[in-house]
Amino acid sequence: MPHDIDIALVSPRYLAGPGDPAWVTVPLHRACRWSTARNPLVPRVILTSPDQLAQLRIIPDPDPTEPWWTLRHAHHGDQRAWSVTFDAHTPVEIIAAVTDALTDPAPPPTASGDPYETLRVAGWHAPRYHDGLTSPEGMSSPDGLARVDRTVHEGARPSGWLVETVDTSVHRLPTLWRAYLDGDTPIQLVAALFGALTDETPLVREPHRVPHLAATHGRTTTGRVSAETVAFALERRVTALAQRNTPTSPATPPSGLHVPKQRRAR
């Protein structure tokens, strides 16, 4: 018989912890037709786009601070090759924002926009260092727990973006996760990641998997939902992404689960 289960709603979402990798991999395979390289003897996942230009690799590393996720795209036309990496503890919903934007058949016209505008509107600001100076190439979240920096490289290649939580220069706490987007990453993917960082929709997690940092520095609300609601959330996401190729499809996939009964808050 149907029953309710406990869940936790965590915000800000960059503190929520990794979540289920299937939130990224299953829609790529089933809705976007990315092929899989199957090898049951190797603990890794490799997905390749239908045009063979893009590849997502998940390679677990004993050190969770090293990149587990690597998204690469080959040189094509005027677009140079690019890559994006994510650490093991990156919330899968933030990774999915990038893969959803990459596979969107009708991406928004943001190529000439300022990706930092999304951060500014959400109250992010130029971080201050111990000497009181600010960084013109960086943005810090209002709580100081997340930061975006524009990296600088010598030579012809443009600089990239480093996304990091926590801001260790302020809180002296271990970094929860990092993402790196090289300078040739399409600007609409950069904007999609920044939009996911500032999205105020809480992320759903199992209560016993909420990171300590989220419990102490974020906002966590527990509640109960039906097991069916949780079980079919991924199916609804796959369906929504598959329907993007039709003119009547919704513009974006569902943003999260509806939680009818909340119990307590911290």
Image (cartoon, grey):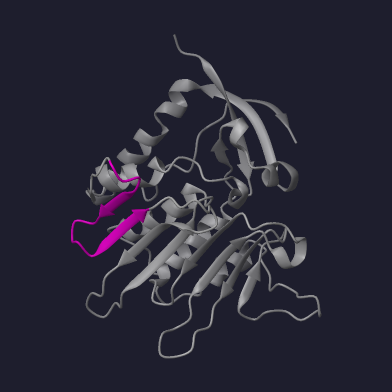
Could you say where residue 195 lies in the image, as x and y percent from the top left?
52, 59
Location of residue 233 (image quadrant): top left
Q: Residue at x 54, y 18 (%)?
A: 4
Q: Residue at x 54, y 24 (%)?
A: 225
As displayed, is residue 106 above or below residue 78?
Answer: above
Count of residue discs: 0
Q: Residue at x 24, y 44 (%)?
A: 39
Which residue is farthest right?
Answer: 131
- Mark yes or no: residue 251 visible: yes
Magenta span of residues: 41-58
Quarter of the image where the C terminus is located: top right
Residue at 30% from the left image edge and 39% from the top image edge:
239
Residue 43 is a magenta residue: yes
The image shows residue 172 at horizontal and vertical percentages of 75, 61
Q: In the rendered view, does 226 fall on the left or right side of 132?
A: left
Q: Is residue 174 above or below residue 124?
A: above
Q: Inspect the magenta stretch and tell me whether residue 234 lies in it.
A: no
